[in-house]
Amino acid sequence: MNSARLTSLFSLIALAALAGGTYWLLQATRPPAAESAAAAKTHTPDYFVDDFSISELDQSGATQYRLMATKMVHYEDDENADLTLPAIRAFQPGKPIVTATGQRGTVNGDASIVDLYDNARILRAAGPSDPEMQADSSHFRVFVNDDVIESKNPVKLRRGLSITTASAMNYNNVTRVMQLFGNVRGNIAASDASGTGKSGAGAK
């Protein structure tokens, strides 16, 4: 074997060793595949809040809504949260305050939908021309942006002395119109039926 061929062989071996060392270094410093890929989020709590309260303001800076709960548990995967003893209160200038409560509830990530469960209740304070109104059900869904509360479960409605039951309901807090669906039954008090400046039960 002549010296030129021997020199070429040594150069080839050195180049192969350099390539092998570079590959080994790359593999040694690369993170494992499981670590390099983003970990999948699971439906596990990522933080807790006690005595939770959040308010939404209108353009003038006045409180339009206030959502409260004795405890909130937030989940990382869907950004939803579980609520204990939730209450959501709606304020409108010149109109009675409306409060919706439940024993437990959920709120979505942008606080636009609040679900109230177990002894859920809507209470509208009495106004100048309207008696107090109360609606009870096992579930109410509050659409915060639309100012609408609905239930697809049986509802008991009390307006003044009048009591009505229905299979489902929809209440628009802007128009103050209550719609009842399904098997609707009720007793309208004489004070509501006499037209003494009060709307009929279930209408407003």
Image (cartoon, helix red, strand yellow):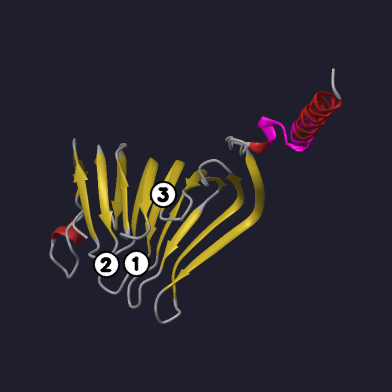
Residue type, numbered disc 3: Arg
Q: Which residues are magenta?
A: 23-35
User: Which label sits on residue 121?
Assistant: 3
Task: Give me the C-alpha separation between circle 2 and circle 3.
Answer: 18 Å
> Quadrant location of residue 199?
bottom left
Residue at 41% from the left image edge and 55% from the top image edge: 112
Q: Secondary structure at mark 3?
A: strand
- Contact (Cβ within 8 Å) of mark 1 with mark 3: no
User: Which label sits on residue 130?
Assistant: 2
- Nearer to us in this view, 13 or 5: 5
Residue at 13% from the left image edge and 65% from the top image edge: 195
Q: Horizontal placement of 46 versus 194: left or right?
A: right
Relative to 146, residue 76 above or below: above
- Nearer to us in this view, 39 or 178: 39
Q: Secondary structure at mark 2?
A: loop
Q: Horizontal placement of 16 versus 117: left or right?
A: right
Q: Secondary structure at mark 1?
A: loop
- Nearer to us in this view, 132 or 203: 203
Q: Does the magenta portion include 189?
A: no
Relative to 118, residue 147 above or below: below
